Amino acid sequence: MLKKRIIPTLLIKNMGLVKDVNFLSERRVGSVLPQIKIYNMREVDELIILDISASRNNTNIDFDEIKEFAKHNFIPLTVGGGINKLAHIEELLLIGADKISINSASYRDKKFIKEAVYNFGSQCIVSSIDYKIKNEKRLCHSISGSVNENKNLIEWIETLQSLGVGEFLLTSIDLDGTMKGYDLELLDIIREKVNIPIIISGGCGSYNDMLNSLNSGADAVAASSIFHFTQLTPNGAKSFLHENGIHVRI
């Protein structure tokens, strides 16, 4: 049985570490590098770094910045933000990323996803999808949540899965930063439709939220606010989950 994963998420903007609510009202919460070192000391399962300014400003991710972060990181690293060329993926893998998160570019050119999978392998490509609920429908959004793509989330998941991506990072914009719990209803809907790993993101406020999501079909939980603004830790989460029957790396 594969072990369930706890994955801290770091959002970077203009070289700083930020946290927002519903993808709005960004609050600077410190510097990135010290946080990376802390998570490495605590031996978290993986780390996700997303440059939220790259797609918004239509600029490239800062490769030099990522290279510096990677020098101090010794755990599996997923990197995303404004990635829309195979050369971007190649460069990030060369400087230390293990997986690449692609979001906005997939709406513009599905061929790019197929080529990314073909050239670098499914295990390397993470499809990141941000979504909001409107009129009881989950709709995909791009450019850090600012553009409604008018695509049904479930249908888009099925499309991307058919293109060969290796993993999904699914983030509820409505729940992001609220610490009200993950979108368990989504997991109930898709767990029979998706045969690749699912990372659920947006809304984690307690260890119980993680437990409920993992019991509902998620393969990993991504979290940010809970680690920035409470005394809860990844190690504490693992101990709690282990005590409640979840197969995690201790």
Image: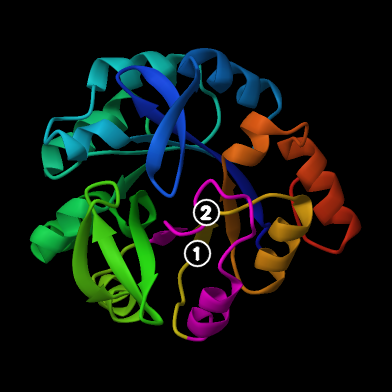
Mark 2 is on which residue type? Answer: Gly
Determine which quarter of the picture holds residue 243: bottom right
Which quadrant of the figure contains the C terminus? Answer: top right
Q: Cα distance, mark 1 to mark 2?
A: 13 Å
* Place of residue 211 in the rendered image (x, y in percent of width and height, measured from the top left): 75, 61
**Which numbered dot is residue 202?**
2
* Residue at 74% across, 35% down: 233
Q: Neighbour class for label 2 at 10 Å: few (<14), some, many (≥20)?
A: many
Magenta segment: does it hold 167? yes
Q: Name the residue furthest right.
A: 243
Foreground of the two, 226 or 180: 180
Q: Would you name the residue on which mark 1 appears?
A: 198
Mark 1 is on which residue type? Answer: Ile
Q: Which residues are magenta?
A: 166-192
Q: Is residue 10 above or below residue 212?
A: above
Q: Are marks 1 and 2 in contact (CB under 8 Å)?
A: no
* Place of residue 248 in the rendered image (x, y in percent of width and height, measured from the top left): 75, 53
* Residue at 67% across, 65% down: 214
